[in-house]
Image (cartoon, rainbow, N blue to C red):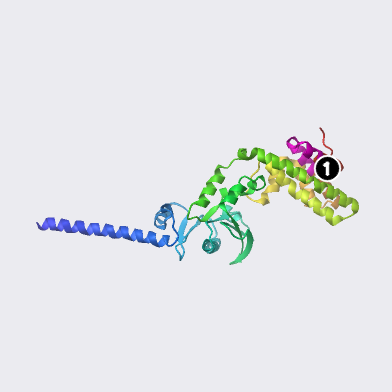
Amino acid sequence: MRFCLFCFFSAGVSLLCVTLSVREICQSVKVCVGRNSIKPTKYLAIRRLQKSFSQTETECDERGVETRVVERQSMDKKVLLVCRKISRRLARHGAKGVVLFGSRVRGDAYGESDIDMHALGKGPRYRLERHQGFLVSVAWMTPAQHRQAFQNPSEVGGIIPAWRNAAILYDPQGIADSLKQEARRWQWQHLNKKADKWVAEEVTGYAEEVHRLIGNIQLGHKSAAAIARSVLAIRTAPIISVHCRILYDTENQLWNLVSNKMGKEWAQLQSIALGEGSQSFEDTCKAALQLYAIAVREVKHLLNRRQYQVVAHACHIAGHPLKD
């Protein structure tokens, strides 16, 4: 009889302990949720169990807003502190998600590199701030605007790699993660016709800069000619990058990537047009005009009759007539 009572008492104690453990877990989950409803898979109690298996750390701020900082082991601790602070502020201001783009994620930042943060939602399009010795850029875009950018030939080259490499800082509803997965699945073939149409119209549009450059040289307006030359030197590469279906992690790589794709002649002309060497002003202008003519030859099969007439005349007055 005593043995039975002892077993019954032991079972009761065990059940009580289990019940208390469950209550503790539920309370910790409830504290984390707070006023902001978070999906069960986002609960902090569950994330802490996963913490030892990943480089992701999840926290809750004083209001119960979940903040997730990734790549802890490979990122500067000071940068992570700034990211946490700003992510919490952006969350309080209504951001549905916060991500980190750029060199601070890739690991190729230099001393004065900015911390490139993007908030998902409606807010100031772009602003710069200083935090703890860092320059911080904060941009707001809605998820719909990001998806539109995924279909915009002028933006995909940079935004697709940015999202693929993005560090998700705050994502209670999984919106940022969804965008990252969409970027990973994205392929140029979904945009081929739209990209070709964009390239053709862009090349045609910059024929006007050829006219400006030549006209201002003839008039002796050196500053205006220098501006037109610089526009041609800078803008031809982004157009060709879309034509060649190039993605780039950073704009700092863009002109070199295009040079590698287009070959030695392009690389030399681009360098001269950008003023990298000791060439005369006249030579830099000639290089910019020739660079434009090469770009036109590269994409002329995409041009319609109207576009061809415009660029053919521009190449003619630049001294590089097109051959039919």
Instruction: Say which residue appears at 82% left-offset and 47% top-offset.
Output: 210
Instruction: Say which residue appears at 31% left-offset and 57% top-offset.
Output: 22
Question: In the rendered image, which quarter contains the N terminus?
Answer: bottom left
Residue 212 versus residue 196 in the image, above or below: below
Residue 18 seen: yes
What's the magenta bit mostly, secondary-structure-wise? helix
Determine if the magenta segment contains residue 25: no
Label total for image: 1
Residue 323 locus on image (x, y percent): 82, 34
Residue 320 locus on image (x, y percent): 84, 40
Magenta residues span 292-309
Residue 90 location, quadrant: bottom right
**What residue does disc 1 label?**
314
31 to the left or right of 150: left
Q: Residue furthest top?
A: 324
Residue 127 locus on image (x, y percent): 63, 61
- Crowding around mark 1 (Cα neighbors within 10 Å: few <14, some 14 to 19, many 20+) is many
- Does dot 1 land on a helix, a strand or a loop? helix
Q: Nearer the viewer, residue 207 or 228?
A: 207
Question: In the rendered image, which quarter contains the C terminus?
Answer: top right
Instruction: Say which residue appears at 62% left-offset and 44% top-offset.
Output: 151
24 to the left or right of 108: left
Q: Residue furthest left?
A: 1
Residue 76 location, quadrant: bottom right
Residue 182 location, quadrant: top right
Determine if the magenta segment contains residue 297: yes
Instruction: Say which residue appears at 28% left-offset and 58% top-offset.
Output: 19
Mark 1: amino acid: Ala
Residue 164 locus on image (x, y percent): 56, 48
Residue 260 seen: no
264 to the left or right of 172: right
